[in-house]
Image (cartoon, helix red, strand yellow):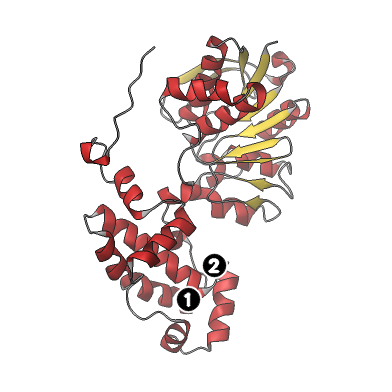
Amino acid sequence: MTHRVGFVVFDGVTMLDVSGPAEVLHQASRLGHPYELVLISAHGGEIRTSTGPTLSGTVTTAEAGPVDTVVVAGGDRLAERPIEEELLATTRAVAARATRVASVCTGAFVLAALGLLDGRRAATHWRHADTLAGRHPQVRVEPDAIHVRDGRFVTSAGISAGIDLTLALVEDDHGAEVARGIARELVVFLRRPGGQSQFATAATAQPARSDLLRTLINSVLADPAADHSLSAMAGAVAVSPRHLTRLFHTELGTTPARWVERVRLDHAQQLLLDGHSVTSAALRSGLGSDETLRRAFARHLDTTPSQYRRRFTTTRYEAAAGTEPARGGR
């Protein structure tokens, strides 16, 4: 039986949010598990992607007919300005009659705006996770997740994570062996190592509202390895430790100690990419020891310092890594 998948698209859509999942479904069809893809837009016809090329042959919800799965693609503008009513109406109509509803990247903002994610866990691009949580506090945003399933809703992290999401959907439909075969064909992980926090600099991206906290944050960022104990930071801005803790909780949603650890981890990540050893990165970031650095990487990034450096230092294959580069072939 053919499974119909409707992609909700719009002007400014990110092309890989559509083409990545579509290729996974195409490969599934080649393996004998057919999926029919339908591009759905508010008015039908051509849609211009964020990079310029157009998607042709989109249809309206009325023309699309019933679909089994809906995938709402993303685009930066969904997080940057109000979502137009016609896109919301299109998504509402097609999602109402689908068995499964998914989103890629900022497509989660459309589902959230419709109230479909209220009380549910959800993922989006790490850069927009705070915005989604702030705009829709009733949604339980998981900023590190590659994809999240909650009931009939499945949401993914940014852009290429749409491939991960669609592999998971295929696994739901046809089992792990089919999904594994597609992952091998596409030369991607069936389950990529680590979460999306390894791509982010989350601590430095969070804005503080008060001048007092902004001043303190700037001083910590300027010298992460200095003494930034709770008492030292409170003394630096002439407030009590209890009051400073309340400010961090209210404005940044965390504790001073956790925030400082993440700043130091961000700094250690950059030091590793700049060529420092694990020991040097631990000392210069303020984390102190190799073991403390390893624990911070495991806790926040679900990886190790050495693995992180190998993944992000260069695109060139190094024989010393001890693995062969992936090759395609049949």
Left or right position of 208 against 51: right
At 68% from the left edge and 43% from the top edge, which residue is drawn? 113
Q: Secondary structure at mark 1?
A: helix
Determine which of the numbered discs, if any, sits on residue 252 in the image: 2
Q: Can you give x and y, in whole percent of width and height, for residue 228 in the image?
A: 40, 79
Foreground residue among 328 and 290: 290
- Label 1 sits on residue: 213
Pick whichever of labels 1 and 2 is earlier in the sequence: 1
Decide: is 223 above or below 111: below
* Distance from the alpha carbon under mark 1 to that under mark 2: 10 Å
Residue 105 position (above or below residue 300):
above
Position above or below: 329 against 14: above
User: Quick one: label 2, few (<14), some, or many (20+) residues within 10 Å?
Assistant: some
* Left or right: 147, with 211 as reference point: right
Say the numbered circle drawn on residue 49.
none
Task: Answer few, some or many: residues within 10 Å of disc 1's Cα (few below 14, many 20 plus, some between 14 and 19).
Answer: some
Residue 213 place in picture, x, y as percent: 47, 76
In depth, the one of 43 and 247 nearer the eye is: 247
- Nearest-to-viewer mark from 1 and 2: 2
